[in-house]
Each structure stands twice: as C-alpha cells, then as structure tokens.
Image (cartoon, rainbow, N blue to C red):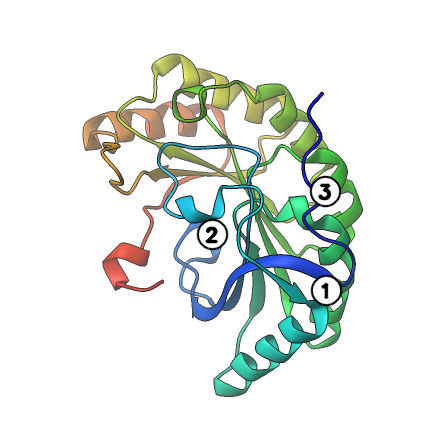
C-alpha cells in the first residue's frame, strides 16, 4: 500500500489560503466564516473548483502560531460565526487540526468541517470538536472510483450536526442517485441531504434542471429532509 507523504504535525500544516467570506454552500449558506484552506486531497473530482489544492503536497507550511495570528486579524474586522476547515481534504491534517479546533472554540468560534467523507479514523479523532460537518458523497462518475463503503462508515461515526451533500453533473446516473438514497436510508433518514448542481468548471457540464428536479423528488419521497441548494459563490462573485 502506497504511503501518503506526511503533510503536517501538531505545530505545522500546509495552508493554501486564509480568508473571510460568506459560506456559499449547504445548510449554513450565507453565514460569515473564516475559511482555512488546507492543501492536498486523496481524491480527484472532475468538478473540483480548487484544483490547485489537490496535489500532495500543495500549499505552504504554516506554523500554528502564524495561523492563529491570521485568524485573530480577520476576526477583528467583523463578527464571524465559525472557522471553516476546508481544502483539499482537511482530514489529511488531523494532527494539526485537533489542537487548532480546540483553540478556535476557546476563541468563541464554531468549527465547520468540509470533507470528502473518506477519512474515517481522522473523523473519530476530531468529531467531538466539530459543530458542523459538511460531508460530500462522492459519485464514481466524478471521481473514477467507488467510495460508498467509506461514506457509510464515515456517516456512522459522524457527529449529530452532519449534513451530506452530493454534487450533480451531467454524468450523474439514475443508479448513482438510487445508491445515494440507499446510503442515507441505511444510516439515518434524519440527516439532511443537500443536492448541489455542479458549477460549470473545466468542461464539466452541470445536471439539466429537469433531471435535477427528478432526483429531488425521488429523494424527498424516501428521506426526511432533502434540499436543493446551488453553489452561490459564483453568483455573489466571492472567493
């Protein structure tokens, strides 16, 4: 088995950027957050809007103290509800995130974790420190591999404040949508499922509106809380 390069320790991690913005996806849409984008990802989705964060390693090494200073500086400008730990795949940096998430809570921030839902052991370590977990359900048509079993185990470990998100493209199939519904039913019908039409990127076409609404009706017929929420960053012209 190929070993992944070590990306971090408790004092340093690879950071791509840190900025203040509005949350543009999911159930916290419109919430002011401080975004910490970490470098490196274990998947390669064809619709990824941050492809520069995929290579392992990517970003620059930051110390914990440097990151804390940057977060404090951004926090002075206006109130922020949470720190959004994103990427890339932030759970590749679990050793670094554990003390940082604890510090963020001590500063009065909530911890918002955005993840591809495949790093189960890292989630076990960080789940008590998460206030919101935005877990993507990755479809084989977008990644070139099946991750259903990883998602199932991840959702069984995930804290209560988790919602699942699936990005829909023109390549999404009826079979994949049935698998998504089956996965959610097996874990809990109470977890919010967000359907997100992909933002056109690098030749990847989004799902047709009629097909998207069909998927929405199928999921709403079998699950308790299903929402259609497009990505709003491009509409707002925000990072």
Say which mark, if any, is on residue 27: 2
Quarter holding residue 69: bottom right
Q: Earlier in the sequence, mark 2 or mark 3?
A: 2
Residue at the far bottom: name it.
76
Q: Which x, y percent locates residue 189?
A: 58, 30
**Front of the two marks 3 and 1:** 1
Label 2: element kind? helix
Asked if residue 146 lies left or right of residue 7, the reply is left
Cα distance, mark 2 to mark 3? 20 Å
Q: Earlier in the sequence, mark 2 or mark 1?
A: 2
Answer whether residue 129 is visible to the viewer in this image: no
Asked if residue 162 lies left or right of residue 222, the reply is right
Quarter holding residue 174: top left
Cα distance, mark 3 to mark 1? 15 Å
- Mark 3 surroundings: few (<14), some (14-19) or many (≥20) residues within 10 A: many
Query: Where does the N terminus fall, quadrant-wise?
Result: top right
Q: Is residue 193 above or below residue 34?
A: above
Residue at the far top: name it.
175
**Residue bearing the label numbered 3:** 123
Q: Which x, y percent locates residue 168?
A: 34, 31
């Amino acid at each position: 088995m190929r070993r992944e390069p070590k990306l971090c320790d408790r004092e340093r991690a690879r950071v791509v950027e840190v900025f203040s913005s509005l949350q543009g996806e999911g159930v916290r849409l419109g919430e002011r957050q401080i975004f910490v984008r970490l470098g490196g990802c274990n998947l390669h989705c064809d619709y990824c809007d941050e492809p520069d964060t995929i290579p392992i390693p990517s970003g620059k090494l930051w110390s914990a103290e440097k990151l804390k200073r940057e977060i404090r500086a951004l926090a002075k400008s206006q109130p922020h509800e949470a720190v959004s730990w994103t990427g890339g795949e932030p759970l590749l940096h679990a050793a670094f995130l554990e003390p940082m998430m604890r510090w963020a809570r001590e500063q009065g921030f909530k911890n918002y974790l955005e993840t591809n839902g495949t790093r189960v052991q890292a989630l076990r370590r960080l789940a008590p420190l998460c206030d919101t977990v935005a877990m993507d359900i990755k479809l084989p048509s977008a990644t070139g591999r099946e991750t259903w079993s990883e998602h199932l185990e991840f959702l069984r470990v995930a804290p209560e404040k988790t919602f699942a998100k699936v990005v829909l493209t023109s390549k999404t199939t009826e079979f994949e949508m049935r698998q998504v519904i089956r996965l959610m039913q097996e874990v809990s019908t109470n977890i919010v499922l967000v359907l997100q039409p992909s933002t056109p990127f690098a030749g990847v076409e989004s799902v047709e509106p009629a097909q998207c609404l069909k998927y929405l009706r199928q999921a709403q017929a079998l699950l308790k809380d299903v929402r259609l929420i497009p990505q709003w960053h491009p509409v707002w012209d925000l990072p």
